[in-house]
Amino acid sequence: MKLSQADFQERRDRLAEQMGPNSIAIIATSPEVMRNRDADYKFRADSSFFYLTGFAEPEAVVVIETDETCESYVYSVFCRERNRDMEIWNGYRAGIDGVIDDYDADEAYAIDLLDEEIIEKLLNKQKLYYRIGQRADFDARVSAWIKEADEQQRRGNGGPAEIIQLDRIVDEMRLHKSTQEIELMQIASNISAEAHTHAMQKVRPDMMEYALEAELVYIFGQNGCVPSYNSIVGGGANGCILHYVENNKPLKDGDLVLIDAACEYEFYASDITRTFPVNGKFSPEQKALYQIILHAQIAAIDSIQIGNSYKEPHHVAVRIMVQGLLDLGIMQGDIEQIIESESYRQFYMHGTGHWLGMDVHDVGSYKHGTEWRTYEQGMVVTVEPGLYIAPDDETVDVKWRGIGIRIEDDVVATVNGPLVLTKNVVKSIEDIEALMA
């Protein structure tokens, strides 16, 4: 499944309507990034740029201009020209004609003409919508264009009187997923769930973390996908390192392995974490902690209801996990005081989720002013409670030390309640042990 050009046009239509009359928006894609000498990282278009265009080539800038009535707008693309020699080396380019024929541009220009052509487009516009602060080098170019346009005031022209952060509009658009976007995210989630299931079946004691990571990446690649973030495969105490990505240690018999890994499908991300025993059987201590987190995660997912606060899943999860730690004797004291003082952060130091979409940590505000915003139809959020007992934490009985557990799923807020996109990978103790048997 892919989005159609009609989908991208509908997004531009909505953007132009919100821009208002006599306005202009300038959106640049990501720059190519060098990995080391003569070798670049594989190019991936900027998410918001692709969201509005469907165009995935580097060295591209889009301009949207509304007229004085806002009844119509002009959609222009600045891109690389066709070049046979360069295409032999680096691949096919759409070129000027291609962005008009295949990407519905009204106008197309060679990217080399951007500095020259953009001034005319800026003249006499009331508002400029621009993604301020994304790239310092491009910010400088935009400032120079505005200065040049303003210098024409004595001839009756001039640049935009207002500069407005474009992300305020586009981020809010991206936060609310359409039916088609949720379908793409479901595909990404299904592939990622298959990879986690495969990893549970392939893991064995003395296997290297990177070898287990390779099993995940194999499933991603077989489905035409790439990882949507750096994969975390942390065995034993490495599971207590929240962003552990070295993945270079052996997996030991009797330890848990925490895998936080998922893929991106057609520019839409998934994000899954599962924690399971390397040898297929939870120890009593592992089982006790795991069950607390699973209980907290299920309850947190259930709290993702239209109208509930964004923070509700976190509050629900924290209360359940603190009570569980008290019951096990890992913490002592009054539950209300522990929650109010946040002393539980010794074992749970991150939030319970984040927006998910084209980016793993997706765009969209979490608050309206000082108030947490509430869930609305089509918002997608992760739910990922965890407990991490450091191997050198001498305040805790030795039998608990070095255990790190997180469980994460991707959830859509809907009028019918939470829709779990990642349900295809097991997470109960019984189901994990049965799968790994």
Image: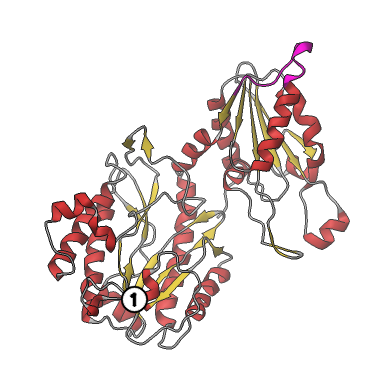
- Taking the spot 47% from the left edge, 64% from the top edge, the residue there is 262
Amino acid type, callout 1: Phe
| Magenta stretch, overall SS | loop
Classify the position of the N terminus by image quarter.
bottom right
The correct choice, above or below, for 186 with respect to 236 in the image is above
Q: How is the image coloured?
A: secondary structure
Could one spot residue 257 in this view of the protein?
no
- 127 or 348: which is nearer to us? 348
The reply, left or right, for residue 381 in relation to residue 327 is right
Q: Quadrant of residue 283?
A: bottom left
Query: Which residue bears the numbered disc 1?
Result: 276
Q: Quadrant of residue 38?
A: bottom right
The reply, left or right, for residue 217 in relation to residue 289 is right
- 6 or 394: which is nearer to us? 394
Classify the position of the C terminus by image quarter.
bottom left
Q: Position of residue 420 (x, y in %)?
A: 35, 57
Q: Secondary structure at mark 1?
A: strand
Residue furthest to the right: 85
Q: Position of residue 190 (x, y in %)?
A: 44, 64
Residue 157 is a magenta residue: yes
The correct choice, above or below, for 185 with respect to 372 in the image is below
Q: Position of residue 129 (x, y in %)?
A: 60, 29
- Taking the spot 48% from the left edge, 44% from the top edge, the residue there is 363
Q: Position of residue 298 (x, y in %)?
A: 25, 59
Residue 377 is a magenta residue: no
Label 1 Cα neighbours within 10 Å, binned few <14 / some 14-19 / many ≥20: many
- 341 or 405: which is nearer to us? 341
Could one spot residue 358 in this view of the protein?
yes
Q: Which residues are magenta?
A: 150-162
The correct choice, above or below, for 103 with respect to 330 in the image is above
The correct choice, above or below, for 255 with respect to 288 in the image is below
